[in-house]
Amino acid sequence: MNAHTADEVRAEIRRKSDEFEEHFRNGRARELVRDYYVKDQPTMSAPDSPLLTDHDSIAQLFTGLMETMAGCRLYQHDVRVSGDKAYELGGAFIKPRDEEEGEAECRYLIVWRNTDDGWRVETDFFAFGKLV
């Protein structure tokens, strides 16, 4: 693991977010989880769900979301870096599969960890609604 400047970490998190959006848009839940989350016990808190602490349960949650949502656009509101951790506060605009429904929003707080595989999500908390 190499040391990175805050700007480099922000750029890497943006790249990982772009990858997340592509996996989501193409219905690839398992690949999304594999490429986005830490290998060792990621943690996710999602609306109307118990705490998720493994790849399979997180992939199942995304599989369900992908059945009703056609895609999402993530945006970073704030990213702070401290050693091998980064904290991202952001939001997402979510496009439903049903064209009759309007775009939804969610907000999230993510803890990233610099691993041997690069920056990965260690803890993910999201809720529906506007960030600001």
Image: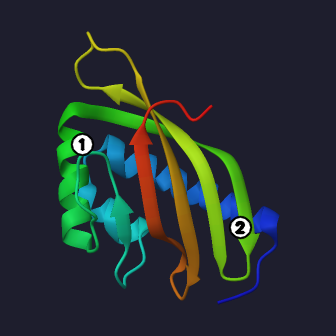
User: Sequence-wise, which precedes: disc 2 or disc 1?
Assistant: 2
In the picture of the structure, the residue carrying the numbered disc 1 is 65
Query: Residue at image x 41%, y 70%?
Result: 37
- Residue 99, compared with residue 12, is above or below; it is above
Q: Nearer the viewer, residue 31 or 61?
A: 61
Task: Give the quadrant of residue 115.
Answer: bottom right
Q: Where, quadrant-wise, is the C terminus in this rendering?
A: top right
User: Marks 1 and 2: in contact by CB < 8 Å?
Assistant: no
Q: Mark on residue 53?
A: none
In the picture of the structure, the residue carrying the numbered disc 2 is 9
6 relative position to 109: left or right: right
Query: Residue at image x 43%, y 66%?
Result: 36
Q: Tag 2: residue type?
A: Val
Q: Where, quadrant-wise, is the N terminus in this rendering?
A: bottom right
43 relative position to 17: left or right: left
**SS of the residue under disc 1:** helix
Residue 45: image location, x then y, percent = 35, 58
Residue 59: image location, x then y, percent = 23, 61
- Residue 70, compared with residue 84, is above or below; it is above
84 relative position to 47: left or right: right
